[in-house]
Each structure stands twice: as structure tokens, then as C-alpha cells.
Image (cartoon, grey):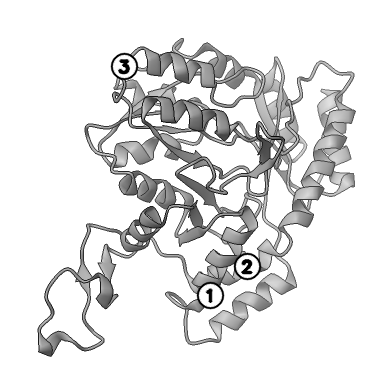
Amino acid sequence: MNNKTIPYGKQTITDADIEAMVTVLKSDFLTQGPTIAEFETKFAEYVGAKYAVALSNGTAALHLCAMALNVTENSKVITTPITFAASANCVRYCGGEVYFADIDPDTFLLDIHKVRALLEKHPKGYFQGIIPVDFAGNTVDLEAFRKLADEFGCWIIEDACHAPGGYFIDSKNIQQKCGNGNFADLAIFSFHPVKHIATGEGGMITTNNKELYDKLMLLRTHGITKDANKFKNKISEVEQGGWYYEMQELGYNYRLTDFQAALGISQLTRANENLQRRKTLAKQYDNAFANSPIITPISFEGNAYHLYVIQVENRLGLYEHLRKNNIFAQVHYVPTHLMPYYQQFGHKKGDFPHAENYYSKCLSIPMYHSLSDEEQAYVVDCILKF
């Protein structure tokens, strides 16, 4: 085992995945073909949403969400400091201002009480939106956030990149899947190789709002439409051929390819099975560390276990010890408000003590559905010996 590298996360590609991609590679469409719509339909069904828009990556998905919700230089949006920078950056892409609120020290999720306190410090209408993040697989209580957002006139973008297949239990004891559109205006997912569903790069937006869906579809492809029913200009007789199109918005080329979509469709068929494997691995970690000084994560029922994050006092020592034994752990995340880019806006160390205390101790250890019991036992043994 010593000679085998064990990363914190990785993709699993099967023969069925390869066959699905080869089929598309031999077809007439490498991009803008029918496989994209098929992936969108199947993913929307998987999460329980009405609409889905496939995109080139999760960051593009966040950017288009901010655009569709009319974020401008006058917009102020709240998010968590414990997330990948893209959750905040999407607001900055549109010129808006990012505000952070601290995390719940037990769940590592955006603390709704801290968000309320921030909202109440300012007049209604001061903030335009909230971007909660489903972190490490644990899901935000979006029902509670929806009530808060409605009270203060905010929209919600759910960053669900860590939790496809995950859910929370609402006030009526009903499972609410991440991205189902029942509470968030828009939700986004990523298909990066370390995610549950991998397409190399790739992203998805889900929503139940037809108006937002139509706007996203336009923005995804340069703001251009070829739909004659949506043309704004009066079309002359010589322009009535099938070549005519209109650019109606300043959009982007954020399209996914058909062969990536084929890989996504194939991976989606195993999503539930892989999720169960992640839950089994998490339970085995819980049991292995039960009588040790290691702090294990609190798990909600609907946890999708994108990450398994432990907390230890000597994080650097353990990190280096694992590397020497070919185990490559990771840290998720360096608090976004401490990045030099965001410090220029006045953020500083000490602003969000729960987030910073979590960061000082957190370590993401190997968690992916192809991790074998033998590999996991080796990881556990190395950690406990340290």
C-alpha cells in the first residue's frame, strides 16, 4: 500500500462511460447536439427540478446565475467565507459587493442567525441576494433561508456543488433534494473530477422559474437566439431564411460539449449507488475515530459526503505525515475573506472567528466512491498512528 497514491478525491471512469463518449465522438455532433438536452432532462429529473441548463463549469454556472438575477455594481450579496472563491467571485464578475457572514461552528454551514443579524443591521432592500453553500455534502436548510430571504426581499442561489443527491428535511418532515427549485431561485452544480458526477469540467444550473431558465439559455450562447418567436427586430423578407439570428444580450460561450454530456449521463446512472458507497465510507470513518482526539464532522441525514473533514490540533504535522505515506489530504477552504483580493475591500483576520478557527484545524481526508476498504483502513491506520 505504501507505493500507491491515495488522493483526497478522484473520478471513477468505467467501460460504460468510455463507450458512451465514443458513441458521441462517432456521431454528427460534438457540441450543441441532442446529448446536451438529454443530460439536462435527466439531471433535472434526478434533483426534482423543472429545468436544467448545462454549462462549461460550475464557475460559469455561478456567473450566469448572477447575471440572470441582475447583479450589478449596485448589488450587495451575502455568502459564506468557507467555500471555494467562485461562490463569491460570481458577484464580483458583475461588479457587485460581497458581504460574508460567519459559519455555524458545528456544521460548517452558513449560519442563518449571523445572516439575519447582518440583514437587520441595514435597511430592507440594502441586500439583493444570499448564496448559501451546501458544504462537504451537508445541506443548508433552504426552507429557513427562503423565509429569511422573503422577509428581506432577497433572492437565493444555492451552491450545491458538494451535494448532488443530498437533501434536508423540511418542516413537514419531507425530504427536499438539493437543487429541486422549491426554495432557491437557482441552484448550481459542478462536474469537476472530484465531484460525485464527473465530466472533466462542466456545470449545471437548475430552477423552477421559466423566465430565469429562458434567460440562462440565452446567456449561455453569446446572448444569441435563432428562435423566430423571440426575435425583437422586424425581419425583412430577404432575412427569413434559417440562417438568421439575433444577439439580444451580452452573453458568453459557456456551453458544455456533447461528449462531456454523454459522460455525465453515464455517470448519472450510478449516482445513487456511488452515494451509498460514500455514506458507508463515512460511517466507517466515524467508527474508526470514535475514541480518538480527532473531531469528526456532524452529519445530517441527507449528507451527500463530497468531503470527509476532520479537525485536529496539529493539522500541518498530520498533513505532512500523510504525504510521506502517499496519502494526499487537502484543506477546504482557506477562508475567502482572507484572500488578498478580498482583503482590499476591508476584510481582515478576526472578522469571522468560527470560520477561522475551523480553518486552523480542518483536513479533508480521502473520500471518493472507488476508495476501497483496504485503502481506507490504511488511511485510518496512518492517522491514528500519528
Please identify the quadrant where the C terminus is shown. Answer: top right
In the foreground, 40 or 25: 40
Q: Secondary structure at mark 1?
A: helix
Image quadrant of residue 384? top right
The vertical placement of 100 against 93, above or below, is above
Q: Amino acid at mark 2?
A: Ile
What is the C-alpha distance between the residues marked 2 and 1?
Answer: 9 Å
Density class for disc 3 (Cα within 10 Å; few <14, some 14-19, many ≥20) is few
Residue 20 percent across, percent down from the top left:
64, 76
| Contact flag, marks 3 and 2 (Cβ < 8 Å) | no
Q: Residue at x 64, y 36 (%)?
A: 136
Nearer-N-terminus badge (3/2): 2
Q: Amino acid at mark 1?
A: Thr
Q: Label 3, on which residue?
A: 346
Density class for disc 2 (Cα within 10 Å; few <14, some 14-19, many ≥20) is many
Residue 216 percent across, percent down from the top left:
37, 57
Q: Is residue 226 visible?
A: no
Nearer-N-terminus badge (3/1): 1
Q: Label 1, on which residue?
A: 35
Q: Nearer the viewer, mark 3 or mark 2?
A: 2
Q: Label 2, on which residue?
A: 265
The vertical placement of 323 against 261, above or below, is above
Q: Amino acid at mark 3?
A: Gly
